[in-house]
Amino acid sequence: MGDALTSLVAFIVAISILVTVHEFGHYIVGRWLGMKVLRFSIGFGKPIWTWIRGADQTEYCISAIPLGGYVRFLDGREGPVAPEDDGRAFNHRPIWARITVLLAGPGFNFLFAIVAYWALFLGGIPTLQPAVGDVLPDSYAAKAGLEFGDKIVAVGDVVTADWESTLVAILDHMVTDGRVSLTLEAANGRQRRATLVVGEDASRLTEPGMLFEGLGFRPWQPPAIIGELVEDGAATGAGLLPGDRITAVDGEQVKTYGDLVRIVSVRAQKDVLVEYVRSGGAFAVDVVIGEQEVDGQIRGLLGVRASSDIGDYYYLRKYGPIDSVGAAVYRTWASSIFTVRMLGRMLTGDVSIKNISGPINIAQFAGDSAQRGFSEFLTFLALVSISLGVLNLLPVPILDGGQIVYQTIEFVKGSPLSERAQIIGQQFGIFALILLMSFVFYNDIARILE
């Protein structure tokens, strides 16, 4: 229940922030270009709070349904325009001004992402070097010669500094020709090239959760080395010490700290044999696993914390105020182009359409990122903001991109589209939106039932 509430609150906060940014773009640019704004609303439906201010008596509203928002400009197509407002209606302004206002919403979404990334880069992002963990036998990774601990230095010509850029590059190369060329660096510093050849299996591997399983390797994780002991914990009572590397619990092999947590969590109050390495020697000790309650469930607790000393696999990625701007612009641009490419490849069938997420899945991501801290939540907001910017530029009549198409046609032909043509376009847009929403809800529910 707690996780669901967190996800719901985080989702509403995220949507409210990003919609406000988007609509503020339309609002402020419209005002700069001389248009009269009648209403600025965050949310749809009945206004529950309204504030009227300014010479134009603009209504600023918080409405009942916090899943969107809108800006309403004075428009001569909706009724007569008072003489004192002559020339200030949306449809009375030059076409270039209308298109600028329509572009401003998505533009502010991209600007928000740049500012978010700038703040993240300036403050420093703890980053785990992209590296290979366990390699599954007879997999694409095994056939390519990938080994545990290999650092992924580059994918094709793209230098990879973190997992986000690595995954984007892997997906991009994989769906292009079914081949992923990697530059790897072994523990001794020697670099080599390896190629993952997936061929026509690329589309299947783009399905949610299938990439690593399908390629046949897991991301590298910190080893199960004890960094700190919890006072009066099970490990302390058994004589384990900081620096010990746990290799097995109850007969199950432990390679990473994640393995340790997974194995221990289901063994609350059980007496298990913990095997470990200390100063080059192998030892074993009986330990009675402790317990803790998490979200109403009892989970096993060994009473240790991971070591922060994991060599150069972990580093703090930080830029100065000026360098952060360039890095933020590049990250936003790269993510935008990647989103466009993936949407195009979904249409051609090269990428699984199961990747399209709806509100349920987005809410889960929002809750998870919020629980991991402000930096993770801000990163999530930046990514969703980019997606909103791209989606709103699609040439669908009820979206900004579709309205831009209308304005461009008016410029070319010298007069607006007929009312009938616009109505047909709006109906098509509504049908497309309903179809899309039905599909994303299906995807969300299917993920829950898997």
Image (spheres, rainbow, N blue to C red):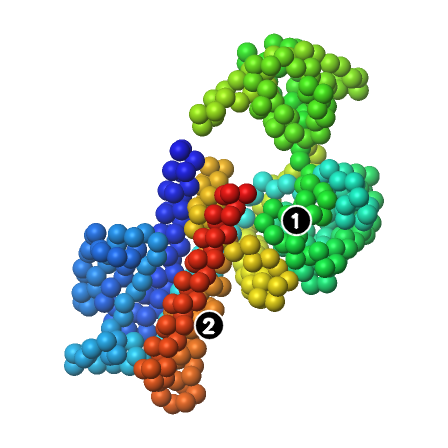
Quick check: 297 above or below 154?
above
Tell me the residue that label 2 is attached to: 395
Distance CA(mark 2)–CA(mark 1): 31 Å
Identity of the residue drawn at 62% across and 63% down = 349
Three-letter code for the amino acid on which mark 2 is drawn: Pro
Give coordinates of residue 310: x percent, y percent.
Answer: 68, 32
Q: Is residue 177 visible?
A: yes
Q: Residue furthest left?
A: 83
- Of 155 and 208, which appears nearest the observer? 208
Q: Which mark is residue 203?
A: none
State which quadrant residue 307 falls in: top right
Q: Quadrant of the C terminus?
A: top right
In this rendering, the answer to whether 105 lies above or below 360 is below
> Dot 1 corresponds to which residue?
211
Q: Secondary structure at mark 2?
A: loop
Image height check: is 90 above or below 283?
A: below
Report helix, strand or loop for mark 1: helix
Mark 2 surroundings within 10 Å by alpha-carbon count, few (fewer than 14), some (14 through 19), many (20 or more): some
